[in-house]
Image: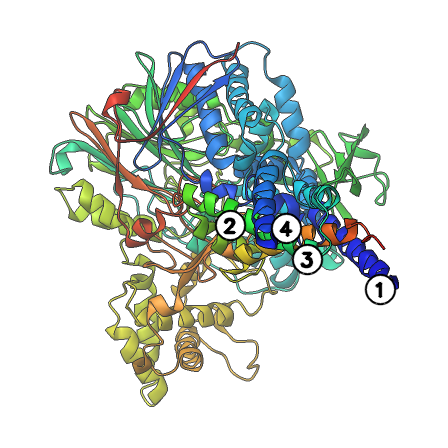
Amino acid sequence: MRRQGLGRAGALLALAGLVWMGARGMAPLPPLGPLLDPVRGVWALAASAEFPAEASSRIPGLAGTVRVVYDDRAVPHVFAATELDALRALGFVTARDRLFQLDLQARAGGGTLTELLGARALDQDRETRGLGMTRAAERLAAALPDTGEARASLEAYAAGVNAYLDAMPAGELPLEYRLLGRRPERWSPLRTIHVVLRMGYTLTQNVTELERLRAAAFVGSAAAGALFPWHSPLQQPIQPSHGAPGRVPLVLPPPGPPDSLALAAIAIAPAAPGFPPRIERDVRGSNNWAVAPARTRAGAALLAGDPHLDLTLPSIWYEAHLRVPGVLDVYGITVPGLPAILMGFNRDVAWSFTNVEADLMDWWAEQVDDVARPRRYRLDGGWMAVEERVERYRGPRGEIVGVDTLRFTHRGPMRRVGARWLSTRWTTLESAGETGAFHRAARARTAREWHEAMTPYRSPPQTMLVADRAGTIAIRSTGRFPIRPGDGRGDRIRDGTTRASDWTGDWSVAELPQSTAPPQGFLASANQEPQHPRDQPRYLGGNWIPPWRALRINALLRADSLTTPATMRRWQTDPGSARADFYAPYLLRAASVRPADTALAHAARLLAAWDRRYTRNTEGAVLFEAAMAAASSGVWDELPPGVRPGGGAFVALLDDPTSAWWDVRATPGAVEGRDDVLADALAQGYAAVLRAHGAPESGGWRWSAVHRIHIWHLLRVPSLSKLDVDVAGGPSTISPSSAGGGEGASWRMVVELGREVRGWGTYPGGQSGNPASRRYDDRIPMWQRGELAELRFPRDAESVPTSSVLMLSPAP
Amino acid sequence: MSWALRTVAFAALTAAGTAAAGWWAVPALAVLWVRTAPCYRGSAPSCALGAALGWAILVGWAAAEGPAGLVAERVGGVLQLPVWGLPLVTVLFPAFLAGAAARGAQPAPPR
């Protein structure tokens, strides 16, 4: 009897534990009951992996029935009666495929990741809110007119997303929510603005003020200024500048004594602030190019585009076709959360973007009344009140996980750097994305109309390339570029005590870098400095990425006067490298001055034998990259860790073989020159590669064995990611990718604007955000091979090879 | 009713109950089962096996509807389980739940 009682007590105890595990989980395990439930839990993801052949739902506010036909690539073709209905449907289908991604991106842009992920996301939320993104989004949302196209389109999209949320069967709740034990949040226009600002954050890369300050603290202001030059020493602008020299002289003053003011400013500063996101700038880059009919085999304009961003699963892009008879017929890619097709084509025009890499954020040194708790800041001889805003970060159960007091001047958010307070102004915070511009552009019939429609677009600035069926190609860097007072430069911290330091206006449309139908018959951009300094006296940014990709693209375009869509596609993954073509001869020449060094001679022979192409099977690329890394370390040994000038300064330095920068600090008794450092770099690179990968004959030097990319799931869950994908291309090839491997061509598209527009494209992922779906990552192999799928662009629903149909009707 | 028949019947009941009311149905049904149809020998193992069988049927149903193998591989991977781990955990969880509930709720045998 006693044994039975004990057995029963044990069973009840076990039951309590199991029920607890089922209902509440035990970190890191989520609640097991709802997770494992075969009907509503993760197993239900299998049933919802593919859409049923037919489905229907309702959306409030729809003017008429919308038919959505999914083609054999799972792309939704939306056939609607009005443009707003098309946007409602776009919200619905995007949520149906990418609900978690929608929510996560909006939270990332709004600084509320902690509510989903807990305190581990606190630093990221702090960064987001500290930059003023949350406050700015609220202001932008409040400033939207109650009537008008902008609010109407944002609300239509939100209605579509929320209609899906209301209708979503339990089995379709995305896996990530099940694992986190959370539910999705309803959509709103504010959340779209969060996504817009997040894009601005991602694409703001040209912020060098603090890096320059840190450099100045070690090598003086004059040297630091030259290390982060205004103009790229190598020129290959997007706006053709015939007869302009390809080089802009840059003289690097020798490292000077530390700048005491800069040193004081950073002496007690924490490590460089986390903004902008630290990336290897030479390995990231978008491209677009277009060819006029006179240079194509078919006599029709061609356009190619491949924006490069972080590669993630699900992909940042979602492919869709919106058709409203007589109004709109546009195909392309959208970012989940944005009610517009961003890049793509209609029946007459095709377009693609690259990031301008302009300087969009400036810093001012503020004089405050109290360094510990500033309440006022000095301005024009008086004091202005500091605006305070208390930010509370909440955890998944609503608990407070952090509190910050943010401060703002009239310019923007303040940040304490050491003993100083800096304020910032950032164009991203002053624009909500202008989705209306995209809608008008999608209806354009010519390249000129298209650019005209995009004129109000402000942020983040993009180099927009467009081609039309009439054969016109046109390019323009569109967006808001501020005008600074004084010398106009934005790459120095300005005096905050006077309004005379503030921005004085924006560039006019006529001043924007641009070209239409140039005589050369082609146009291209690849994040390079967009105008030759001869053509543009204003400051747009500094420390530009060397135009290696642009050089390569233009060389390919110049060499082919009968371009086809197939060659455009091949060029998107072309393994040639203008960078390797430029630097390798310097390394070889340096090695030749030490013929007695057998290891160096062997390394030089291997490098000389390399065809300077980053193919999967090449071996020389590994040696070249190791040598370049060693060269960079050798040259910039005067600078602190984490401060590295862009490639432009290095290019300029090669012209001055006896510059003091070549002297190696670790050898005080000797004075090294360019060839000494480059020869040492090749020798060190060779030794490093031997250590890491064995002898060249071992096969370990193969590029595909060494160079892998990783396409991480948004939450960086390995089993939901695609890791160690080998691809051709390397730093500064047309399709660059980093050794760490998170960036790459996030979308590739080629469009031929003939009698009928034809498009090809793909991206490294899949349309579905459901990891149980074969559409989750089905496009990666094609992307990896550099191939493109033909994009279906039907005029009617009946001509689509249909995988599924969704009927959306007005809610009563 | 034989032990095997009771097990199969409880499997069907668990499958139906889970489909209707979710995972909470498993311990609730086990309690009801041993209270309304007492059988003092082997009730808990019968309920445990029946619950496992019931959920296995539902998983099989899900597998017929879509790529359950991918679910096992990818979701199992998230939980750091091998590919067979998730199906195993999915049948063990209701088995333990039902077994513990049945054992805890089992009435004392008459003296």
Q: Chain of mark 1?
A: A
Circles 2 and 1 in contact, beta carbons < 8 Å: no
Can residue A693 be spotted in the picture?
yes
On the image, numbered disc 2 is attached to which residue? Answer: A713
Q: Is residue A260 above or below residue A312?
A: below
Q: Residues within 10 Å of mark 2 (few under 14, many from 20)?
A: many
On the image, numbered disc 4 is attached to which residue? Answer: B94
Mark sitting on residue B42 = 3
Left/right of residue B11 with respect to residue B103 in the rendered view: left
Picture mark count? 4
Q: Residues within 10 Å of mark 3 (few under 14, many from 20)?
A: few
On the image, numbered disc 1 is attached to which residue? Answer: A3
Q: Chain of mark 4?
A: B
Callout in the foreground (4, 1): 1
In the image, A387 versus A366, the foreground residue is A387
Callout in the foreground (3, 4): 3
Three-letter code for the amino acid on which mark 4 is drawn:
Pro
At which x and y percent is residue A388? 79, 32
Circles 2 and 4 in contact, beta carbons < 8 Å: no
Cα separation between marks 2 and 3: 47 Å
Circles 1 and 3 in contact, beta carbons < 8 Å: no
Q: Chain of mark 3?
A: B
Left/right of residue A50 with respect to residue A363 in the rendered view: left
Residue at image position (63%, 38%) is B22
Q: Residues within 10 Å of mark 1 (few under 14, many from 20)?
A: few
At which x and y percent is residue A15? 75, 52
Residue at image position (74%, 56%) is A264
Establish whether labels 2 and 4 are both on one chain: no
Left/right of residue A11 with respect to residue B90 in the rendered view: right
Circles 3 and 4 in contact, beta carbons < 8 Å: no
